Amino acid sequence: MKRLIDWHLERWKIQPHRKPMLLRGARQVGKTFAVRKLGKNFKNFVEVNFEYLKKAKTIFEKDLNPERIVQELNILLSVDIIPGSTLLFFDEIQDCPEAILSLRYFYENMPSLHIIAAGSLLDFAINKIGIPVGRVESLYCYPLSFFEFVIATGHYRLAKAILEHKKDDPIADIIHQKGMELVGQYLAIGGMPEVISRWIETQNPRECFSIYQQLIDTYRQDFNKYCKEHQIKYVKELFNEIPRQVGKQFKYSKIHGDYKKRELAPCLDLLCTANVVYKIHHTAGNGLPLGAESNSDWFKVIFLDVALCQAILGLDLGTWFLNPNAEFANRGAIIEAFVGQELLCYSTPYRKGELYYWKKTEKHSNAEIDFLFEQQGHVLPIEVKSGDGRTLKSMHLFLQTHPQTPYGLRFSSQNYSRFDHVLSKPLFDIFSLAHEDQKESLLSLLDFS
């Protein structure tokens, strides 16, 4: 299964001035698999899992001398760690904070050794001890994007046709229909690697859905690892209720139970740190950076994966296969979450992705833009329409009140078109907004030489 992250890791491997790499992202998004895949291109691949191999932690307790650490790892693991020909992988590194700190000295004293570190709850450890600034770099990992899903399921010609399409002209009906059919499949299957692998193997949706129940249980079991005892009940409540507020401005008052914002807000931040959910921040959208005019009290929330979100709600994911057109019209909030997930996947992987939306601040106004997006120095408004999406009152209002904005974007189930200052694209073409850092990695998915 080819991933966008593979291209970035391959490029890191050959950089003459590379730094130790931290892979960051939620549990089960494919971090370990990507590193093991890269390890096949080295003479030696050495994996140290600190959760599994408790003895390894004691090696870092004496001091952070790379030469001594490597020597003792060689003895403990009965391997040869050779700079220049070995990939050393520290997995679940959050269980050994000293190993995170040691990365600085590996960079300074043993720069020729390739080191990658990852951990499902790594960001919690980083928040406590920090990271060696300027001595390590990060790559952020997400579930498979839709474009990766298309490639993984063998639709190379379709992916190439969409990638090469001239965006202002309608695409051939057969391509459009197939593209939307696959969007429906993706909305049911989601982007979690294990689920997609099972789908490719069995083509049985029910087997895929059962994996999501296992994943949900895994994420819930993690609560005990990063929550204080009194916070667990709040995190559980948020985890279960957030899917009901997808597509809406998040309100703590909507959470069932007699809870207060001061109790729930820190727990929502914990879920964000675990990369299980992402906030969509409100911004005035008058210029860049978008975060300069954000309002911390106004935000929306999406889950890391649309199928996971629907599974928590207990929705019947099989209907995406039976009648996808009806589902596109009826599940607008899920379609909006899908677009947000896609925007994160195609953002630069070298910093944590951020999402923004716009809402008119005057009372009694319901004007809202689903996403604001930065492209080539401009702020672009993005509307997501689950049905025909012919009404664009909020879009036109935004364009009128933000004259510096060149045009707006609408994503829907409709074909490509342009009217006035609004460019319409099908939901399968969100990758056209990919950050410059991702464009070559997208092309690499089509290279099977």
Image: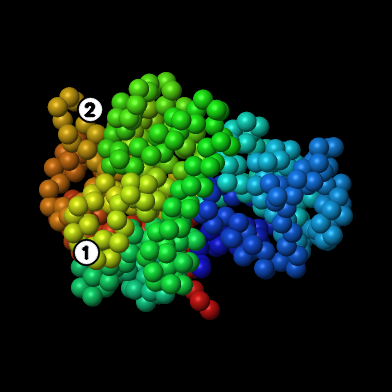
Q: Secondary structure at mark 1?
A: loop
- Taking the image as shown, residue 325 lies to the left or right of residue 61, namely left
Who's the residue at 66% across and 50% down the image? Answer: 91
Q: Nearer the viewer, mark 2 or mark 1?
A: 1
| Residue holding disc 2 | 361
Q: Nearer the viewer, residue 87 or 75?
A: 75
Who's the residue at 58% across and 60% down the image? Answer: 34
* Residue 83 visible in the picture: yes
Residue 195 placement: quadrant: bottom left
The type of residue carrying mark 2 is Thr
Residue 356 placement: quadrant: top left
The type of residue carrying mark 1 is Asn
Please tell me the numbered disc located at residue 323. Answer: 1
Who's the residue at 49% across and 42% down the image? Answer: 220
- Taking the image as shown, residue 71 lies to the left or right of residue 249, namely right
Q: Secondary structure at mark 2?
A: loop
Contact (Cβ within 8 Å) of mark 2 with mark 1: no
Residue 143 pos. (x, y %): 46, 55
Using the image, determine if residue 38 lies above or below residue 237.
below
